[in-house]
Amino acid sequence: MLQAMAQAEVGDEQKGEDPTVNRLLGMVAELLGKEAALFLPSGTMCNHIAIKVHTQPGDSILVDQQSHILRSESGGAAFLSGVIVEPLAGERGRFTHEQVKASITSGSLYQPATRLLCLEQTHNFGGGTVWPVEQLDSVCQVAHSAGLATHLDGARLFNAVVATGVSARQFAAPFDSVWIDFTKGLGAPLGAVLAGSQAFINQARRYKHIFGGALRQAGIIAAGCIYGLEHHIERLQEDHANAQLLGLGLAKIAVVEVDLTHVQTNMVYFNTSRTGTNEGQFLQELLKQGVRMGMVGTQIRAVTHLDVSREDIIQVTTAIQQLLDN
Ligand SMILES: *Cc1c(COP(=O)(O)O)cnc(C)c1O
């Protein structure tokens, strides 16, 4: 990947003249089945720009209660777009078309108009869980028939593709806008691509300038993203197998609570609360052994990725077993 980056042909990205960025945009638009695409520095900026294009200040948008837009973007939707973020009580990040229907308001003197439905595939804080394509289609259909736009946060879309065999294009089909991240499973240092209709991307490009996301010789970054697309998609299967292995290993430790039915992709959520262990302290101890995990709410989140091998997983399981036995 570094070699590809070092050898990249470059140009002025904000003028649309970087050949490597343009090649990446063509690849992503094709993969996602959209007319056009836009290169951005981060996934968060993809969400912000999409929300900005799809709404006016004072509108409301529907998201899952555990969504990245609501929980991890520092109120950006309110700050940058002036929208009300309406949380849906999803189950592991997934909600039903009935819930969507019941939450849409058409706008009045008293109520904001609901303009946009957002969802995540896979769902991060839901556990790396996958939306079945039928459920995804049904919520989007309800949204569209009420005049809403639909937006897919596809930070980990390829994890869902690899886990199900459904194509990225099929998952993206019912959405007006969709983006993928290169810094998650695909293993690039920087970059995300937002896709949609040509009209959507034209507007998005203006907000990219306004938000300070227009770049110069971005080809060095885009080359890493292309490398990720060409070499790191199929291998996500290894991350999924490693998450399964970790989940199974943790399930054998009596004091660990882990629900294996939710280990669907590259994440394992678990807790050790039955031992009365201080989880913060536990994670500190684990870090001393070179294993970094994080807290999401009351759960510990372990994420497998291309720098974690099967042998590492076995070592991690042993380390946890020892820590909790002491
Ligand atoms: C990581 C992530 C983002 C944000 O992406 P960045 O590139 O880190 O800004 C958005 N949504 C989800 C679901 C994510 O996991």
Image (cartoon, helix red, strand yellow):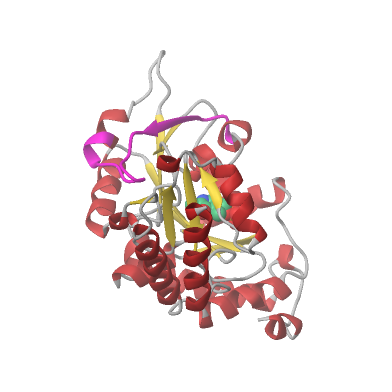
Residue 189 shown left or right of residue 241 in the figure: right
Q: Residue at x 52, y 82 (%)?
A: 230
**Would you identify the image quadrant in which residue 273 lies?**
top left
Residue 93 shown left or right of residue 225 in the figure: left
Extreme residue toward the front, this view: 326
Residue 248 x, y percent position in the rendering: 35, 64
Count of labels in the image: 0
Q: Nearer the viewer, residue 309 or 185?
A: 309
Q: Is residue 180 visible?
A: no
Q: Is residue 227 above or below residue 150?
A: below
Residue 93 shown left or right of residue 184 in the figure: left
Q: Nearer the viewer, residue 300 or 51?
A: 300
Residue 247 x, y percent position in the rendering: 38, 62
Was residue 129 drawn as part of the magenta stretch in this picture?
no
Residue 80 x, y percent position in the rendering: 62, 36
Q: Magenta part of the protein: which range?
A: 81-99
Question: Which corner quadrant holds the N terminus?
Answer: bottom right
Q: Is residue 156 above or below residue 230?
A: above
Residue 323 x, y percent position in the rendering: 53, 55
Q: Is residue 227 visible?
A: yes
Q: Is residue 109 above or below residue 73?
A: above
Q: Residue at x 71, y 74 (%)?
A: 219
Q: Residue at x 48, y 54 (%)?
A: 325
Extreme residue toward the top, this view: 110
Was residue 88 drawn as part of the magenta stretch in this picture?
yes
